[in-house]
Image (tube, rainbow, N blue to C red):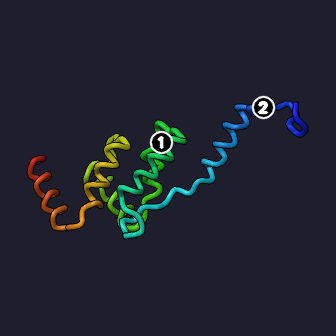
């Protein structure tokens, strides 16, 4: 064995490698999404997808994602808990679709028109 390697093999200790990766993931900064021009909803969701690919959390994905909403986006989410039914079991895919439908549109009148149409279909 080479000098300074101690009991580690040439390829390293897998448990140490996993622990090091987990420590790096824990230090990763997930950006907040506030519906401003800083970051688009699509880009924010792509960053979250990458994070979740590297750090799987099956049951807590939506909670983790919504903790990173701020400003208008956070208000939209909490308002939706009561009026749009976000409080039902929502998957990350459903959250993504709702977020993109709400914040990726450039014309707010189009959003409200679509919302009015969807409410008519529900009634």
Q: Position of residue 79 (x, y in %)?
A: 31, 59
The percent coordinates of residue 97 (x first, y second) are 29, 49
Relative to 76, say whether 59 is above or below: above
Q: Residue 23: horizontal and vertical position, in percent?
A: 66, 46
**Which residue is located at x 32 percent, y 54 percent?**
99
Q: How many marks?
A: 2
Front position in the image: 12 or 90? 12
Residue 18 in the figure: left or right of residue 62: right
Q: Earlier in the sequence, mark 1 or mark 2?
A: 2
Residue where numbered disc 1 is placed = 60
> Which callout, 1 or 2, points to the residue nearer the camera?
2
- The quadrant holding residue 61 is top left
Query: Considering the numbered disc 2 on the image, is that residue within a helix, a strand or a loop?
Result: loop
Disc 1 and disc 2: Cα gap in Å? 37 Å
Q: Residue at the bottom extreme?
A: 37
Residue 3 placement, left or right of 54:
right
Q: Which mark is residue 74?
A: none
Q: Residues within 10 Å of mark 2 (few under 14, many from 20)?
A: few
Expressed as whole percent of the image width and height from the top left, the position of residue 4 reads 89, 40
Q: Residues within 10 Å of mark 1 (few under 14, many from 20)?
A: few
Q: Could you tell whether 25 is left or right of 65 in the image?
A: right
Of 9 and 120, the residue lying toward us: 9
Q: Quadrant of residue 80?
A: bottom left
Q: Residue at x 12, y 47 (%)?
A: 122
Task: Give the residue displayed 54% in from the left and 41% down from the top.
Answer: 55
Q: Is residue 38 above or below residue 86?
A: below
Disc 1 is placed on an element classified as loop
Q: Quadrant of the N terminus?
A: top right
Q: Which residue is mark 2?
A: 10
Q: Residue at x 49, y 43 (%)?
A: 52
Which residue is farthest front?
Answer: 2
The residue nearer to you, when weighing 68 against 52, is: 52
């Amino acid at each position: 064995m080479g000098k300074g390697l101690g009991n580690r093999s040439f390829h390293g200790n897998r448990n140490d490698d996993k622990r090091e990766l987990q420590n790096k993931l824990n230090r990763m900064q997930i950006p907040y999404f506030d519906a401003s021009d800083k970051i688009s909803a699509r880009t924010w969701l792509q960053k979250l997808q990458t994070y979740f690919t590297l750090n799987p959390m099956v049951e807590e994905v939506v909670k983790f994602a919504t903790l990173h909403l701020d400003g208008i986006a956070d208000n939209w989410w909490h308002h939706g808990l009561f009026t749009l039914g976000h409080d039902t079991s929502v998957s990350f895919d459903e959250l993504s679709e709702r977020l993109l439908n709400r914040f990726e549109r450039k014309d707010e009148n189009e959003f409200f028109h679509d919302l009015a149409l969807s409410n008519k279909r529900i009634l």
